[in-house]
Image (cartoon, grey):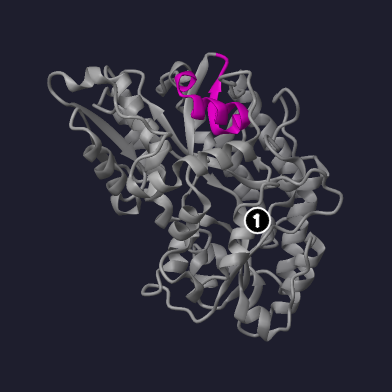
Amino acid sequence: MSRKRITSNRLNRRALVGGAAAATSGALLAGASSAYSAPMLNFRQGEPVTIQFWGGEPAESGPGAMVEAFNALDPAIQAVYTRYVNDDTGNTQLDTALQGGADIDVVQMYGNPRLAQRIDAGADLSAYIAQEQAISDWVADEPEAVFGNDAGTFAIACVREPQVIFANQKLLDNAGVTVPDGWTTDDFVALSQELSGDFAYGTYAPPDSARQIIGSNYWYKEGATESNFDNPAFAQSWETHRTMIEDGGAFPWTDVLARNLRVYQQNLYLTDQIAFWPTAFWVMRYINDTEAFPHDFITTTLPLPEPAGADPVFNPGTTGNWITMNPSTEKQDAAWEFMKFRLTDGARFYLSAGKQPAFPGTDQATVTAGLLGENPEERYDVEAFKSVAFDPGIILTSDTVLVAGAEIQQLVQQLTDRYLIGEIDLATCVADTKAQADEAIAAASA
């Protein structure tokens, strides 16, 4: 599977960001910008068109305010938001609703493996994108912003999610630790060890250095008929993590599994139990919620450490929060008007939930204020955040080869969990992951 470029013209991203920001910064704050134009006149005749929008986030995390703002623009098109829970059960319910012909016009989906499974549940957006110059230019310059195959483009990313290191400045200061510019994975390991003590660990886990070295589609060899887990980068990444656990620099994986901390990492960071937290911006909702997570330290933002010899260095983060149109809808033009608003002006309503817009039409000041919240200096080193968040050198990954993706994701987690708690050795982990992934690919390709 490959992404489809909508146009052959390419536009320098810095030029697009600068031009769009200059044109829209004031208008965004007022609720409209040049990136979003009013609905077409033919919707003003007859009864209003109602768009049924399904997404996996609570209404208070952005969708509610976004829909309200869209509905205020023009009574000719109104949207209604329905939440599905973005877990296995909720996604099964969404699939059942889509397959059963439920009244759904627009869906926001999460994660490329699920998106790939539902590619037939999306209408081709190519013609709509081609009609919008700013969106078309952006997609041409950043093809990872869309998802599709040779038949067309079926989804557009609404969120940009680079990975960074959030660091507890108090713990760094107490240990006399200064993170050097251009730090490496070896620096990260050494400083994590130095930051570990009786009541804290240096980090939750190291960044995925295999992803940083290989980049997109790193599970697969060329042609996607065989897995890539015999690439030495995987053994290197997994061994680094286990060594850090054994040396006390990373949080014990037995505790992670026993306490389900994979989904509650914020509980460790915001109670001074880890100093370095490799993560993405969506967790800022917890840092900003000082009532639920009171803490007395400043969070500084660091770029990911770089593995030795990697060139280029990829960021394991990606674009996501994919918006799609149900091909069964009879309201495609109206649905596109809504999707366009969600992608452009509507993106600002998700900032408080830690969602950085993928489309480069929201100015940096608005993004910074939205992500960091009120009185940010009480919680963040604001300048450090801006220097990392808006680094033009970040190269995000975007997986477009997803053969047996869900099965591989599950088996990688299961086998690396066993390795990290000492149940199997590295050679067994690598060999079993490779063998089982190859079997899954073969079965899916049969």
Measured from the top left, where is residue 416 in percent x and y?
66, 52
Q: In this view, does 359 lie to the left or right of 418?
A: left
User: For residue 409, which quarter of the picture?
Assistant: top right
Q: Mark 1 points at which residue?
A: 418
Considering the image in quadrants, where does the C terminus appear? top right
Residue occupying the point 28% across, 38% down: 70
Residue occupying the point 59% across, 24% down: 3
Q: Is residue 271 magenta?
A: no
Q: Which residue lies furthest to the top in this view?
A: 151
Q: Is residue 317 visible?
A: yes
User: For residue 230, which quarter of the picture?
Assistant: top right
Q: Which residue lies furthest to the right in this view?
A: 309
Q: Residues within 10 Å of mark 1 (few under 14, many from 20)?
A: some
275 to 409, vertically: above or below: below
Residue occupying the point 62% across, 20% down: 445
Measured from the top left, where is residue 388 in percent x and y?
64, 57
Magenta span: chief secondary structure: helix
Q: What stretch is highlighted in magenta?
A: 129-150
